[in-house]
Image (cartoon, rainbow, N blue to C red):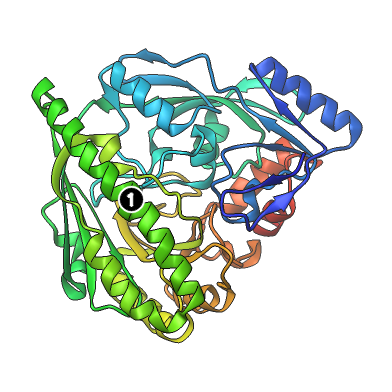
Amino acid sequence: MSWSNWAGNQRTTPVRTVLARSAAEVAAAVVRAADEGHRVSALGSGHSFSGIGVPDGVAVRPPSGPGIVVEGDLAHVPAGMTLRTLNDLLWEHGRALPNLGDIDAQTVSGALATGTHGTGAGYRGIAAQVRGFEIVLADGSVVRADGDLLRLGRIGLGALGVVTSVTLETVPAFALRARERLVPLEQALELATLDADHAEFYWFPHTEHAVLKSHTRTASWSHNVDIGARKRRYGSLMRDEVLGNGGFALVCALGDRVPALVPRLNRVSSRLMPAGEYTDRSYRVFCSPRRVRFVEMEYAVPLSALGAAFAGLRSAAERYARAVTVPVEVRLTAADDVPLSMAYGRESAYLAVHVHAGQPYEAYFAAVEQVMTGLDGRPHWGKVHTRTAADLRTVHPCLDEFRALQQRLDPGGLFHNPHRERVLG
C-alpha cells in the first residue's frame, strides 16, 4: 500500500505496514525486518514535511492504546496515540501539557522525534516534558531508557529505534484567555515584551500588518466558563471551518490561478483571521484545525536575531513569494536542555514559511534558508530544509554525541532512511 504525508510532497510504498498493539509486536516486526534485510521506520501521522518520516522498508505503527495512566504529575502514554486524544484524556484527569504546537494531529512519538515546540517566552517544547520512554532497539530488545539514551533520545529523529511508550510530566489543567487582533507589523515584532504567557503572530506576505495572538493562563476552570466556551466554540466553528478553512481554501485557489491578486487577497485574509477575545481549555486555544494543505519550512534563531531574521525573510518574500497566500508564523520559546532541540541552550525565535500544497516553493524556501543559516539558524527536523550533517554540527553541538549513540545502538543502520542519513551522516 502506498504512503504519502499530509502535504503530499513525500511519497513511498513500504514493503509492508505493521499495526502493532504492544511493544512485543513491535519487537517481532523489527526482528523479522532485520532478518529479511529491510529497514524499519516508525509510522506517525504523516505531518512532517521533510523526509524524516518516510518509511524506507517496513513501516511500524507504534501502539496507540488502550489509554493513559496518570500518577501524580506523570502521565504514561502510548507512543502512537495522537496529541488530540492525549489532550482530552489528560483533561479528564485534571492535567494538561504546559505547552503545545498549533496542531494536534501528530502522534506523541512523532511530535517528540521532530521537536514540536509551541510558543511562550517562559515555556519549552514538548520534549522537555519527557521523563522516560520505552523503546525497541535494533536487536529487538525492549528497554526503558536511562542515562545517555534518555538524555539524548528525547528528540530521537526516529533513528534510535521504535518508541512504544512515553512518560510525560504534566501540569494541573488550565484555561487560556486568548486575544487575537490585527496590529502594525512593528508592534507584532515586539513579541518578547508582551505581557502574555504565550504569544505568536501571523504575517501575510506583502502586507503591513500582522495578526497577533496573545494567550494568558488562568488557573481556574469553572462549569460556567465551560458553558461559555461551548458557546464560543460554535462561533469558532464558523470562523475556523467556514472562514479559516473553507474560505481560505478559496483564497488559495484564487491566488494560484491569478497571482496578481495575491497582495489584495492577503490583506483581506489578515483582516478576517483574528477571533477577538475568548477563554477556553488550554489545548483548544493552542491547537486549531488545518484543512488547507501546505508545505512548510521553519527555522529557529537566537531570540536576539528575530529582527534581522524577519527582515531577511521579508526581503526574500518580496522577491520569491509574490503568489504566496499562506502566512508566515513567528513564535518564541525559552531555552531548554534537550540535545537536538531547536532551542537547546538558547532562547529562540521561530520563523515558519508556508506555500499552498502543489505550488512551487524551492526558490522562496532557499532564499529564506540562506538568511536563517547566516544567523546560526537551526532547521525544524520535521520541516523542509536542505542541511546536512556536515553543517548541522556547527549549530547543534550535541549532534556528534547523538550520532555516536545511534551508531552504538544501531551499527547496521536498521532505522536509517535517506533523510536521516543526510542529517546524521
Q: Quadrant of the C terminus?
A: bottom right
In the image as oriented, which residue stretches furthest toward the right? 36
Q: Which residue is found at the position 54% from the left and 42% from the top? A: 113
Q: Nearer the viewer, residue 423 or 204?
A: 204
Q: Between 58 and 345, which is closer to the camera in this rendering?
A: 58
On the image, numbered disc 1 is attached to which residue?
242
Q: Secondary structure at mark 1?
A: helix
Instruction: Name the residue at 81% across, 41% down.
Output: 412
Residue 5 vertical position relative to residue 17 in the rendered view, above or below: below
156 shown above or below 389: above
Which amino acid type is marked by label 1? Val
Q: Residue at x 31, y 58 (%)?
A: 331
- Residue 31 relative to residue 332: left or right: right
Which of the pair 53/129 is nearer the observer? 53
Nearest the camera: 344 or 66? 66
Q: Is residue 356 above or below residue 61?
A: below
> Percent from the top left, x then y, of residue 272?
24, 62
Is 294 displayed left or right of 61 in the figure? left
Marker count (numbered): 1
Q: Residue at x 40, y 66 (%)?
A: 251
Q: Characterize the local packing of mark 1: few (<14), some (14-19) or many (20 or more) Cα atoms within 10 angstroms.
A: few
Q: Position of residue 134 (x, y in %)?
A: 57, 23
